[in-house]
Image (spheres, rainbow, N blue to C red):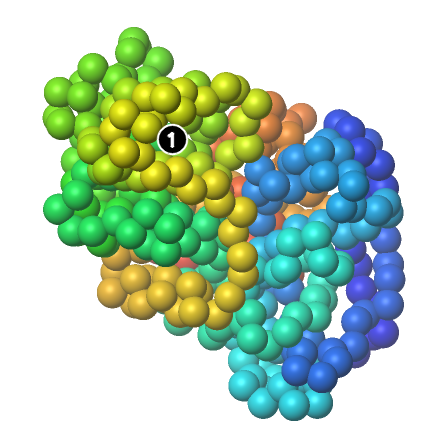
Amino acid sequence: MSNLMRVMELVRFGDADAAFAPQEMPRPTPGPGQVLVRVEATSVNPLDLQTRRGDYRDQVALPTVIGNDVSGVVVETGPGADDFQPDDEVWYLAPIFAGQGTYAEYHVVDQALVARKPAGLSHIEAAGLALVGMTVWEALVERAGARAGERVLVHGGAGGVGSVGVQIARALGAEVVTTARAKDHQFVTELGADTAIDFSAGDYAPQIRAMGGADVILDTVGRDTLTRSPEILADRGRVVSIVDTPEPQNLLAAWGVNATYHFLFVSPGRAKLEALGRLVDQGKLRPVIGSVLPLADIAQAHVLLEGGSTSEGRSRPRGKIAIAVNPLDQQLHRTESLARRS
């Protein structure tokens, strides 16, 4: 095994086209309680875009390797790391703003943050589920305490986070309402939404109020969706926002409906991964992978996630954008996807 590894390094803040450069750096060595993982796949998230643009420059010193999702294979364990053995297939969310990120061939992590990859997911799929799945689980289960029979509104149900939100809300036994463009209504309904509302066709609030309001709102959009949440909350409703927003909040209206607000910056951990894995095994959860790019094309992946188009004419897909660090995994994922369609 070479002592070097390929990475895509963030060398400057700003536009994606000039932000990244391929580099070789020493392969990390696992310390006590750590495992070294060969990264088969990672993915891009809105957090990555914000980091690349410089929104968190106080926490990020350049040059650096960013990224947080991992699905891969254990290749070495450090002293006392007895939970895993070489060749174990694992997945995890790397600590945010702490050490080397996952746009790399290898990654070192504390074994307490790692879980065994669900057998029913490819590495591409697992990497596309780690951060968003843990975010939604923490939002709906740990923060909002969503229960069977409640009405859950997921803003942006066709997106990477929203598509997982719809599935997990359905798995919890909730009545699921989501906002999505009309062209995506069949898609979100197939994911498990009971009602899809075209947010671009007019004001969505009256339709939700007519239902009796939402017991839980998962805000994946920000802007006025968070500001307007009190207008459509049922009494004692809960709002969980995963988006930082400068918009002023209507807190007097929130007080009037006894609302509870949660602002979520997800924390990694094995327990959440294992809970997601059980839903996968039960056939209740599967990530939506809209596009798969190689690690060398990480800048194009950022362009796609921002809603732009690449030089090959690709535009932003539904669901997640995954990165195949091992080109073989990208080929296998395409084969599996074709098999599922046939």
Q: Which of 79 and 147 is in front in this view?
A: 147
In the figure, is residue 118 to the left or right of 284?
right
Q: The N terminus lies in which quarter of the figure?
A: bottom right
Q: Position of residue 159 (x, y in %)?
A: 42, 35
Residue in view at x 84 percent, y 36 percent: 12
* Residue 120 image offset from top left, x and y in percent: 37, 66
Left or right: residue 25 versus residue 207 is right
**Going 30% across and 62% down the picture, which residue do you hit?**
279
Q: Which residue is drawn at 54% across and 80% down?
A: 88
On screen, residue 303 above or below 190: above
In this rendering, does residue 142 appear at all? yes
Circle 1 SS class: loop
Report how many numbered discs are placed on residues in the image: 1
* Rendering coords of residue 282 (x, y %): 25, 65
Residue 182 appears anywhere in the view: no
The residue carrying mark 1 is 156
The extreme top residue here reads: 202
The residue carrying pointer 1 sits among few (fewer than 14), some (14 to 19) or many (20 or more) residues within 10 Å by Cα, namely many
- Residue 62, compared with residue 324, is above or below; it is above
Q: Position of residue 167 (x, y in %)?
A: 29, 47
Q: In this view, does 196 lie to the left or right of 243?
A: left
Residue depicted at x 86% and y 59%: 24
**Residue in the foreground of this view, choosing between 1 and 99:** 99
The relative height of residue 153 versus residue 201 in the rendered view (above or below) is: below
- Which residue type does callout 1 highlight? Gly
